[in-house]
Amino acid sequence: MIDPEEHRITSADGVEIAYVAFGAGRPLLISHGGFTVADEWFATARSLADRRRVVIVERRGRGRSGDAPAHSLDREIDDLAAVVSALGGDVDLFGHSYGGALSLGYALRAGFDGRLVLYEPTTAVAAPVGGDKLRPVRALFDDGRTTDALALLYTSVLRMPADFVEATRGTPTWDHHHALLGTFLRECEALDGFAPTIEDCAALRAPTALLLGSMADQWTRDNAAGFVRRIAGLTLLPVHGQSHFAHLTDPAMLAALVADALEMLRRPS
């Protein structure tokens, strides 16, 4: 088994950001989603690390990394830029969910020209991520009714059936999501302001692939369709038999698909 190496850098606003690395070679930098910590990506990283260095950034507000009172997508893009710099600049990017939006935002801002793989990136290109539905969740959270806020988030913002809420309540998944709820809410609010246009995406220099679960819900499909219309030459690949969490349900399969996507995006030498 490949052991992880832990590293830390200081971001532009002074927050300490951690990242975990496996293997050797050209780095693939993984940015994870909202209700996730770096450790949940270890199995996927290990499956990829026999052919390259795989680095998982622990995004601010969770796990090994620090935090600040103010939050924005731009601050997290600064975090990603600092990790890219620490890795020497010559990297490829893989982002999941919020991490997909983060990776895309960095690529657009930095003129990134490495390979970019996005697994169901969460953005507001087709519809708000939270919008009006997030306001009552935020009100419950701010009032200290955090378990009620999480239950409402599941059914309204995340579009989960009511029986899922009851089946999840009191489980380790519920406890994990409850602990990250404040961080998740601020990230939803940040994503509601991130809707790259066709003109924005025309400046994208990175060859890009988008992974879409064959069991994805309609909101996620509409979001993916928005990028098909916006990103010229986008490679769209199905994640067969999966929805949003293949890194948990079949990490070896996901790793193989990411490796295939990166190979497809390789520019002729």
Image (cartoon, rainbow, N blue to C red):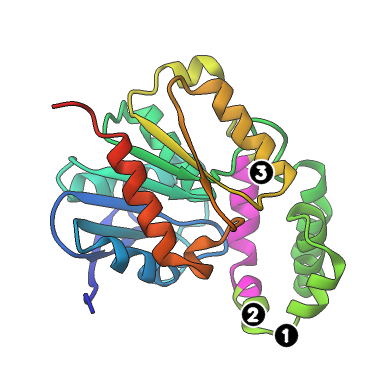
Determine whether the residue tagged by mark 1 lies in a helix, strand or loop: loop
**Quadrant assignment, res 185:** bottom right
Rendered view: 97 above or below 206:
below
Which comes before the other along the chain, label 1 or label 3? 1
Report the front residue among 72 and 234.
234
Left or right: where does residue 171 sit relative to residue 97? right
Residue that lies at the very extreme toward the front in this rendered image:
240
Q: Mark 2 points at which residue?
A: 175
Residue 66 visible (yes or no): no
Q: Which of 187 and 100 is in front in this view?
A: 100
At x 75%, y 64%, the residue is 141
- The amino acid type, in three-letter code, at marker 1 is Gly
Q: Look at the image and give the residue range highlighted in magenta.
A: 177-191
Dot 1 surroundings within 10 Å: few (below 14), some, or many (20 or more)? few
| 67 left or right of 188 in image | left
What is the chief secondary structure element of the magenta stretch?
Answer: helix
Which label number is shown at residue 170? 1
Asked if residue 181 lies in the magenta stretch, the reply is: yes
- Identify which amino acid the numbered label 3 is placed on: Thr
Figure label count: 3
Comparing labels 2 and 3, the label whose residue is closer to the camera: 3
Residue 45 higher or lower than 192, as above or below: below
Image point (18%, 50%), residue name? 87
Checking the image for residue 220, the label placed there is 3
First along the sequence among labels 2 and 3 = 2
